[in-house]
Image: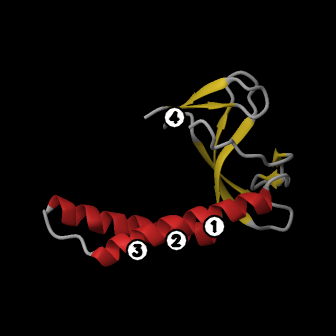
Amino acid sequence: MEVKNACTKCGCINTIDIHSLLRKDITDKDGNHYLVLYFKCEQCKAINVVQIDNNETRQLYRTFKSLLIKVMKKRVKHETISPKDVKKKDKYTKTLSKMREELKQRTEGKTMYNDDGSVFVESLSFVSREGR
């Protein structure tokens, strides 16, 4: 699957796929750890962050993922999917989106660092979700 997205710095349209979407563990100046998904602009090489997670959102995602796997296995076996599981899925989706949005707002504009202490990005900014 490919998605096209504009660079936040130069506006160049980039094609994002499994090979161009990168993962990186980073920290802020207070030592808080995050995992970011990003792509580098093909033209200007700017870092464009697509998603940010912390330990809390990663744990919720793992719980959400295990529920999805459970539901998919039932679907393959043509078993009935519990309405409770559907409600849980909806709740997890909504909660995860809200937590990630709050995390995005708290971290936007902050300097983020690599494990070795070097600067990963001077001012964290996120790719706009509009137009996807």
Secondary structure of residue under mark 4? loop
Discs 1, 2 touching: Cβ within 8 Å: yes
Compare marks 2 and 4 and give the one earlier in the sequence: 4
Q: Which residue is mark 3?
A: 88
The residue lying at 64 percent from left, 61 percent from top is: 100
SS class, disc 3 = helix
- Contact between labelled residues 4 and 2, with CB atoms less than 8 Å apart: no
Residue type, label 3: Lys
Between the C-alphas of marks 1 and 3, the distance is 16 Å
Residue of label 2: 60
Tell me the crowding category of disc 2: few under 14, some 14 to 19, or many 20 or more residues within 10 angstroms, Cα based.
Answer: some
Residue 65 sits in quarter = bottom left
Q: Disc 1 or 3, which lies upstream in sequence?
A: 3
Viewer-nearest of discs 3 and 2: 3
Query: From mark 3 to mark 2, how far is it between C-alphas?
Result: 12 Å
Residue at the image point whose x is 77% and y is 46% from the top = 125
Q: In the figure, is residue 42 to the left or right of 1?
A: right
